[in-house]
Image (cartoon, rainbow, N blue to C red):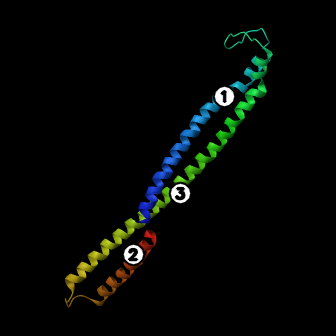
Amino acid sequence: ESRLSVILEKEAEISACHTGAEKKLKDTTALYGRMKESNEQWAKDARANLAVGGNCPVCGQIIASQEYLDSISDSHFESILTPVREKLETEKAQAASAALEHMKCMAEVKHLQSLSETFKENMQETVSSLNKANDEYGNPDCSKEHYDLICLKLEKVEGMIREKDKMSA
């Protein structure tokens, strides 16, 4: 199995992780935004004016007990918001990390694809030269320079094969 195919599989996994992290972040951001409204100043002011026996300005319900008022205190709403804010920060970091990993993987894929394309082009060029040399083999017009050029190309291809073998490892 070649290194490129392994990296392509890894890229697909990382891409799915990145997409999932972005979706979680979007959902948590929306939830945090909705919950944050309960801690904004207007909500605090509205809660400050509530009293037992009075009506809730939002739903119109009669406030029946002090326990109910205690359950909707500013500190209660802040304590509910804290874990969501912490989750949001964690998911921001995870989404950023996933995006970075995805970019690194894509850069490696592009690099390996470029090496593979260069290898393919050089191989085609060498095969063409070898075919030409084979056609000229035994031909008295085949020069030493042409032979030396073919040897250089073969050395270059051998180096590329070694490089490709390293990529495949």
Q: Quadrant of the C terminus?
A: bottom left
Residue 146 location, quadrant: bottom left
- Which of the numbered marks, if any, corresponds to residue 35? 1
Spatial separation of the CA atoms under disc 3 and disc 2? 25 Å
Viewed as shown, does residue 128 lie left or right of 8?
Answer: left
Please tell me which residue is depicted at 21% across the width and 84% down the height of the picture: 136
Please tell me which residue is depicted at 64% across the width and 30% down the height of the picture: 33
Q: Quadrant of the N terminus?
A: bottom left
- Residue bearing the label numbered 2: 161
Disc 3 crowd, CA 10 A, few/some/many (<14, 14-19, 20+):
few
- Above or below, 143 against 115 in this view is below
- Please tell me whether mark 1 or mark 3 is closer to you in this view: 1
Pick the front one: 138 or 110: 110
Give whichever of discs 2 and 1 has the lower sequence position: 1
- Name the residue type under label 1: Met
Disc 1 crowd, CA 10 A, few/some/many (<14, 14-19, 20+):
some
Say if residue 72 shows up in the picture. Answer: no
Q: Position of residue 23 (x, y in %)?
A: 54, 39
Spatial separation of the CA atoms under disc 2 and disc 1? 60 Å
Where disc 2 sits, the SS reads helix
Give whichever of discs 3 and 2 has the lower sequence position: 3
- Residue bearing the label numbered 3: 104
